[in-house]
Image (cartoon, grey):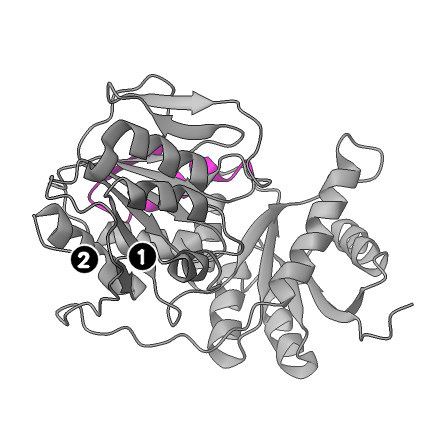
Amino acid sequence: MSDAPKLRVLVVEDSPVTRHLLVHIVNGDSEMDVVGEASDGREAVTLAGRLRPDVILMDIILPGMDGLGATQTIMHEFPTPIVLITAAYDPRDKTKTFEAMASGALTVLSKPQGPGTHGFAEEVANLTITLKLMAQVKLVRRHRFRQADESPPLSRARRTAPSDQPIEAVAIAASTGGPAALATVLASLPESTPVPILVVQHITPGFHDGLVTWLNGLTPLSVRLAEHGARLRSGEVLIAPPGRHLGVSREGRVNLSPDPPISGHQPSATYLFDSITRAYGGRALGVILTGMGDDGVAGLRTLKEAGGVVVAQDRATSVVYGMPREAAVLGVVDHVVPVELIGPTLVHLLNGGNV
């Protein structure tokens, strides 16, 4: 039996019944222990400061100070990994969830329905695994972004097949911390962006429509869930739906595939990068943002070998420097850029700027 200390969890939920269930689930795992319970956001802030838990499990809809306000305060005063949990079906509540993620919360899960319901065991496993993974994320007080008019710092990689062809499509991959990074990138792109943008964002099923709604309020581009067979359009951002891989055809149409998960991911960033390379070759641009693991890295190698361009988020602005780090280690990255300068870098490249 391991002597390692248990992960200390703060549970924040206003419903006594749901809070009891969440506490029961967490304490039922031999590696975790609930050290505090709160029923509203202000109590959550107080307990987070006093108990300094390893991770916080928090509802977004709370009386008084809600989960958004609590997240903002906690991340400012004593940064702590926060996993949001919600059963909300109102798109406005989902929008508030993404605002909290932009303020520093790491991810969002659906509330377990309760013992005896279909899929309960899977929900419990997902919740406990997520808490353990997020507890490992090292957080700091939110950094100050560089001014947008500064020149992006570039990290060059030798291109195996240089191409002077104009870029005709952009593919973006993101995981933990991705919604906030996506918002930053897309908000800085002009409405006149001359290419389609395809996105794989790892997120809990059921929250994709909320992500689309939230992003549409932040960028001049049109954001929507990808639909099979739809024609790609310049200035449009297509988000991969849950349970399908996102790809494109050589005829410039969306291809949603039910193929099995790749390294546990469906949709998979590697699938997207492979597909966009087959369709566009050296006229494709791949972007890899913050996230755990290495999804997308194998696909970026394919894109790079075809002469495409690869942009990666830097370590300092990544919530989790996993996916972009693996791409950099593999040597397939042309530009390593802080998140607030990725958009300007894309504009530069789309306008014919050199790699």
Left or right, residue 196 beside residue 46: left
Residue type at the position of mark 2: Thr
- Mark 1 against mark 2, which lies toward the viewer? 1
Q: Say which residue label 1 marks.
A: 333
- Residue depicted at x 43% and y 49%: 297
Q: CA distance from mark 1 to mark 2?
A: 14 Å
Q: Residue 128, image x and y in percent?
A: 73, 54
Which numbered disc flags the more N-terminal residue, 1 or 2? 1
Classify 10 Å Cα crowding around label 2: few (below 14), some (14-19), many (20 and above): many
Disc 1 to disc 2: CB gap under 8 Å:
no
Q: Residue 274, image x and y in percent?
A: 38, 35
Q: Is residue 197 above or below residue 233?
A: below
- Residue depicted at x 13% and y 38%: 194
Left or right, residue 322 beside residue 180: right
Residue type at the position of mark 1: Val
Q: Is residue 217 magenta?
A: yes
Q: Is residue 239 above or below residue 78?
A: above
Left or right, residue 332 beside residue 283: right
